[in-house]
Image: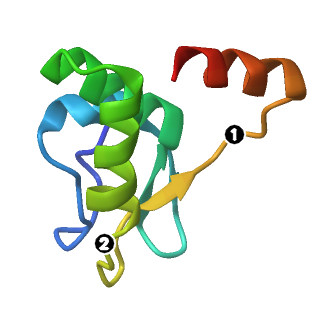
Amino acid sequence: MNLEHLDDETIVLEPRTLDSAIVSIDMRSDRLIYDYDLLVEAFMRDNDWDISTAADWVNYNVCGSYIENGPIIAYSMIVDDEIDELMRLL
C-alpha cells in the first residue's frame, strides 16, 4: 500500500515490516487500519515467536495502548471451526 500521500501526523506502527498488516486507510481521519491477524503473523515472522507470544505482545503493546489518533485495529470474524483450530494451536 502506498503511504506517501499520508498526512505528516499519521501514526505508522514500527518496525515498518508491519506495513504488511495495513489493509486500508480511513480517509476521513487519515488513520491507518491494520488487520489484527496480520499483525500477529508479522510479529511471529519478525521475531520467530509462536502465536501465543505474538498475540500477547500485540494485545498488550498495540491494542492495549492508547494513542490519540492512532491506528485502527480491524478484527476478522471467525467461525467455530477456526476457533477450534486456534485453540488447538495454543
Q: How dense is the environment of label 1, judged by Cα within 10 Å: few (below 14), some, or many (20 and up)?
A: few
Q: What residue is at 23 percent from the left and 55 percent from the top?
A: 12
Residue 39 is at least partly visible in this image: yes
Q: Which residue is mark 1?
A: 76
**Vertical order, 52 against 61 (above or below):** above
| C-alpha gap between disc 1 and disc 2 | 20 Å
Q: Secondary structure at mark 2?
A: loop
Circle 2 residue: 65
Q: Position of residue 25 (x, y in %)?
A: 49, 53
Q: Residue at x 54, y 15 (%)?
A: 89
Circle 1: element type: loop
Considering depth in this image, is 54 or 41 the residue closer to the camera?
54
Quick one: 15 or 81, which is closer to the camera? Answer: 81
x then y, percent, for residue 9: 20, 74
Residue at image position (54%, 73%) is 28
Mark 1 and mark 2 residues within 8 Å of each other at the beta carbon: no
Q: Quadrant of residue 48 in the image?
A: top left
Quadrant containing the N terminus in the rendered view: top left
Q: Residue 31, percent across and down?
A: 41, 65
Q: Is residue 13 left or right of residue 26?
A: left
Q: Residues within 10 Å of mark 2 (few under 14, many from 20)?
A: few
- The amino acid on which the numbered mark 1 sits, given as a three-letter code, is Ser
Q: Is residue 25 left or right of residue 67?
A: right
Residue 23: image tag: none
Judge whether 89 appears above or below 3 on screen. above
* Three-letter code for the amino acid on which mark 2 is drawn: Ser
Visible residue check, residue 1: no
Quadrant of residue 42 within the rendered picture: top left
